[in-house]
Each structure stands twice: as structure tokens, then as C-alpha cells.
Amino acid sequence: MTQHQLKNILFLDVETVAGYDDFEKLDERLKSQWARKASFLKREEGITDAMLYEDRAGIYAEFGKIVVISLGFFHEEEDELHFRVTSLYDHDEVALLEKFKGILEKMDEDIKLCAHNGREFDFPYLSRRMLINNIKLPSALDLSGKKPWEINHLDTMDMWKFGDWKHYTSLELLATLFGIESSKTDMDGSMVNEVYYQDGNLKKIADYCTDDVIVTANLYCKLKSIPAKFKVTRVN
């Protein structure tokens, strides 16, 4: 029964950074658009558009890029439940997105995508970056013409909201409440841009992202009251 409840769900998480390491590398047209965007963002006194770009641009698909996509799914081996998880990562965003698309297209057409805050961040960010990079959307991300009940997107944050659309709850807070081991060890989401551009440590970001997918899978089981005990297999 447990395996059936978890069948055809691809758990995922993405990590994003600013599109460039330096605001001055943007062309003048995009600089102008960022200045317009930045004018609506809260900032402390003395924070320039360039400083805000470094700190916040990665949040927005129009100004950021994806550097890591972590994926995980449940499967059964010899009557034991396993969670297989891996991370795709690349400095070349097009190559990364093409590889992710290829994986999706090889999976069951009824595959469900699950992420924490996925409906507001991961799924639209992936879709926008694919289109910006002239990549045709795979069926799992293409919402055009689909009715709400035909969209196979699951979101653990939405599940926790219970219809309260004003309520944001972080993955870390829910992990704490449900006694799930934290993915926040020596880094958190606010550090990704710095680790990427200053430290050049893409593997560290990928490991962090992988841990988030494991936490999300655990949280999904808790929210669905699925008594799942599973072995995690990390695939490099």
C-alpha cells in the first residue's frame, strides 16, 4: 500500500543564482529592467541596485539561472522501500535543463512533480528558464490548455496551508515540527549565490539541494500519514 501511494512521484528541488557574478556584466537594457524591479524591493539605506542584484537576482527567473536540479523517487527492492536521489548540476544552464527535460520525457506520462513551494517557485522557474533558453517545455511542465485537476504538481507547502493562501511555512520549520533531520548544516539557501560565485563550489550546492529533496520526501510522507520507512540511496 505504501509503495502504491508513492508511485510515480518525482521529488525535486532547484538551486538558483544571479545570472552574472557582476551587475555590470548585464547589458544596458537588462540593467534598466533590474533597476525598475529593484525600485519595488525593500532595502536598507545605502544598498545599491548592484548590491541588491547580487543578493536577490537569483530569486527571479528573469534575472537568475538554475545551477542545480536534485531529483528523487521511491522504488521497491526485495520488499524494502528505497528512495533514490541524485543531483544534476552544471555551469551551462542549457545543458542542465536539456538533461532534466530528457529525464522527464523518459518517465511515465502520469509522473507527478513534488517540491516544497514548487507551485510558486520551482515549477514556474524551471518553465521560464526553459523558454528563455529556447527549450520546448516537457509535458510535465506545460500547463497550456490543462484543467486544474489535470496538472500533476504536488506542493508540500500547499498541503500544509490547508487553503490558507497567506501562510508561508519554510521547509526547515516543518522539518523541525515533524522531527525530520535538517538539510541546513553548514549552509542554507541564502548562501547559494556566494558559494557559487565566490567559492566556486557547485558540488557543495548540489549536496545541499540533494538533502532538501530527502527532507521534502520525508515531509510528504508525514503530511499524507504514510508510515514509510525507507533507505536513501544517493547516486552521483
Image: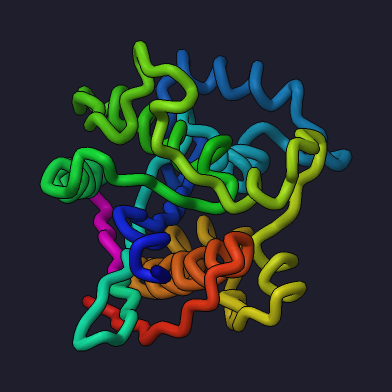
Rendered view: 83 above or below 72: below
Residue 201 rendering spot, x and y as whole percentages = 38, 71
Residue 209 rendering spot, x and y as whole percentages = 44, 66
Q: In the displayed image of the protein, which residue is found farthest to the front?
A: 1
Q: Is residue 122 visible?
A: yes
Q: Residue at x 69, y 26 (%)?
A: 38
Relative depth, front residue between 30 and 40: 40
Q: Which of the 4 quarters of the picture holds residue 197? A: bottom left
Image quarter of the N terminus: bottom left
Relative depth, front residue between 68 and 72: 72
Q: In the displayed image of the protein, which residue is found farthest to the right?
A: 45
Q: Which of the 4 quarters of the picture holds residue 94? A: top left
Is residue 120 highlighted in magenta?
A: no
Q: Which residues are magenta?
A: 86-92
Q: Is 199 left, or right, of 234 in this rendering?
A: right
Residue 221 rendering spot, x and y as whole percentages = 54, 67
Number of marks in the image?
0
Relative depth, front residue between 72 and 135: 72
Q: Is 71 left, or right, of 54 in this rendering?
A: left
Q: Residue at x 53, y 70 (%)?
A: 226
Image quarter of the C terminus: bottom left
Is residue 88 highlighted in magenta?
A: yes
